[in-house]
């Protein structure tokens, strides 16, 4: 187990959670368990539900020991930041749901090179700052939810290489103006 409380135990279901094993691996549901940290998880976890807890942080390189993880719900918790490299080893991640947390800012290179990411939920947080190069090289990202935050400025280099992004939800923020080329080369953008 590392310093932030995440550990991986082969073939063991966390005692506070419910687990279902199938041919894809383990589907783990730890929602509404009053957890303050992410419990030790099996290394064949492919679906992880951690919503409605009191979790305050996600370990850097969260997926390193769970290479099959493709879906994580960690919504409705108390997370205030997502450190750079949190998802660096999450090549299989298809959906990340971080809505209804306390995230205030997103640093550069937080969500990069995640080639299978399709959905990213960051709505209903307290995000006021999105650093340049935060979202880069996400070729399959189709839907990005950033609505209901405190975003006031979006810099031109925030969104880069989004060939598939079709829906970018930014409503209910404090955006007053946009710089030129904010949404350049986003040819599939259908809804803004």
Image: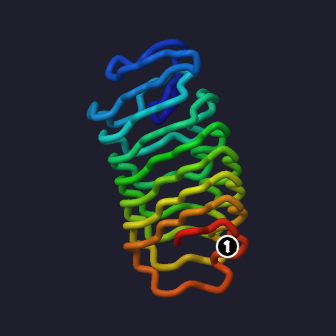
Q: Residue beneath label 1, please? A: 157
Q: Position of residue 114 (x, y in %)?
A: 67, 47
Q: Is residue 91 left or right of residue 69?
A: right
Q: Where is residue 73 in the image (x, y as percent from the top left)?
A: 43, 41
Applied colour scheme? rainbow
Kindly identify the residue that appears in the image at 62 percent across and 68 percent down.
Answer: 189
Mark 1 residue crowding within 10 angstroms, few (<14) / some (14–19) / many (20+): some
Height in image: 91 above or below 76? above
Q: Is residue 29 left or right of residue 94?
A: left
Q: In which quarter of the image is residue 163?
A: bottom right
Looking at the rendered structure, the secondary structure element under dot 1 is loop
- Count the marks: how many? 1
Kindly identify the residue that appears in the image at 37 percent across and 73 percent down.
Answer: 172
Height in image: 98 above or below 173? above
Q: Where is residue 57 in the image (x, y as percent from the top left)?
A: 43, 44
Residue sitting nearer the eye, 73 or 167: 167
Height in image: 49 above or below 189? above
Q: Where is residue 103 in the image (x, y as percent from the top left)?
A: 42, 58
Q: In this view, does 115 lie to the left or right of 103?
A: right
Q: In this view, does 120 lie to the left or right of 92?
A: left
In the image, farthest residue toward the top: 11
Kindly identify the residue that appears in the image at 47 percent across and 13 percent down.
Answer: 12
């Amino acid at each position: 187990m590392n310093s932030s409380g995440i550990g991986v135990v082969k073939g063991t279901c966390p005692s506070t959670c419910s687990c279902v094993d199938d041919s894809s691996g383990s589907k783990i549901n730890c929602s509404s368990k009053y957890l303050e940290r992410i419990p030790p998880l099996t290394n064949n976890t492919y679906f992880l539900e951690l919503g409605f807890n009191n979790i305050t942080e996600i370990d850097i390189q969260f997926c390193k020991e769970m290479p099959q993880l493709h879906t994580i719900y960690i919504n409705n918790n108390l997370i205030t930041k997502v450190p750079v490299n949190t998802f660096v080893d999450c090549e299989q991640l298809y959906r990340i749901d971080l809505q209804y947390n306390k995230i205030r800012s997103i640093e550069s290179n937080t969500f990069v090179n995640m080639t299978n990411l399709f959905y990213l939920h960051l709505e209903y947080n307290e995000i006021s700052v999105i650093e340049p190069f935060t979202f880069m090289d996400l070729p399959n990202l189709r839907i990005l939810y950033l609505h209901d935050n405190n975003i006031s400025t979006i810099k031109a280099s925030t969104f880069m290489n989004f060939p598939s992004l079709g829906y970018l939800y930014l409503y209910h923020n404090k955006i007053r103006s946009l710089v030129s080329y904010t949404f350049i080369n986003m040819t599939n953008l259908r809804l803004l």
